[in-house]
Image (tube, rainbow, N blue to C red):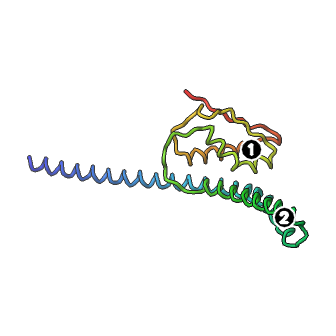
């Protein structure tokens, strides 16, 4: 009878270990799927942002090309050449900054919760959505002051959420509408 109890206990322990292994595998699969879903949402946002960034890049690129053509044609007076060279450098800096913002947003990072200043996060997000906001003639107003509101979250995921909210708000807003951003803390 004692041997039967031990055997039954071993079968129960084995079944429990097996169930725990199955549960751990299911949990990992769920986390993997959540990561894929978040990446898919981010790629969708990146597609929308890329169209805006392309517009943001084309403007300074056209200026750079025009200055370059003028300089290489030899028609620019010597006393104006440095102005043209500076205009080219400024245009390239604008292009570089636009590409850097998009790449920073697009990078896949592991989940790292941290204290995030919401005013700073919104400020960092606005240039990403600026082309869409400008195209829709919408104004974005933020009442969040630096240091006023913080959240413990993954910065990249929170930024993605704010970008998505702002894009959705911009597309849903009438021309010359206003998007107001605020935060409430407990």
What is the CA distance from the residue labelled 2 to the residue labelled 1?
41 Å
- For disc 2, the marked residue is 81
| Coordinates of residue 30 in the picture (x, y in percent) | 46, 52
Q: Helix, strand, or loop for circle 2?
A: helix
Comparing 120 with 76, the one in front is 76
Residue 64 marker: none
Q: Which is more N-terminal, label 1 or label 2?
A: 2
Residue 170 marker: 1
In the rendered image, which quarter is residue 175 located in? top right
Q: Which of marks 2 and 1 is in front?
A: 2
Q: Residues within 10 Å of mark 2 (few under 14, many from 20)?
A: some
| Coordinates of residue 126 in the picture (x, y in percent) | 69, 45
Q: How crowded is mark 1: few (under 14 residues within 10 Å), some or many (20 or more)?
A: many
Comparing 64 with 167, the one in front is 64
In the rendered image, which quarter is residue 72 located in? bottom right
Which residue is at the far front? 79
Identify whether 49 is placed above or below 143: below
**In the image: residue 127, left or right of residue 117:** right
What residue do we see at 52% from left, 45% from top?
154
Identify whether 144 is placed above or below 68: above
What residue do we see at 74% from left, 59% from top?
54
| Coordinates of residue 57 in the picture (x, y in percent) | 75, 59
What residue do we see at 81% from left, 62% from top?
82
Quadrant in which the C terminus appears: top right
């Amino acid at each position: 009878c004692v041997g039967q109890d031990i055997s039954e206990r071993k079968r129960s322990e084995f079944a429990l270990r097996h169930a725990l292994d199955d549960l751990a595998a299911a949990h990992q699969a769920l986390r993997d799927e959540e990561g894929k879903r978040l990446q898919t949402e981010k790629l969708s946002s990146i597609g929308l942002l890329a169209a805006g960034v392309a517009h943001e890049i084309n403007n300074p690129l056209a200026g750079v090309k025009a200055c370059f053509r003028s300089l290489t044609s030899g028609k620019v007076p010597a006393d104006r050449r440095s102005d043209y060279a500076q205009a080219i450098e400024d245009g390239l800096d604008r292009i570089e900054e636009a590409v850097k913002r998009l790449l920073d947003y697009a990078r896949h990072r592991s989940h790292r919760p941290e204290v995030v200043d919401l005013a700073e996060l919104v400020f960092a997000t606005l240039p990403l959505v600026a082309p869409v906001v400008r195209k829709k003639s919408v104004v974005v107003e933020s009442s969040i002051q630096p240091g006023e509101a913080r959240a413990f979250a993954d910065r990249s995921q929170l930024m993605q959420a704010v970008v998505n909210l702002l894009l959705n708000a911009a597309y849903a807003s009438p021309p010359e509408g206003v998007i107001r951003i605020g935060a409430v803390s407990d």
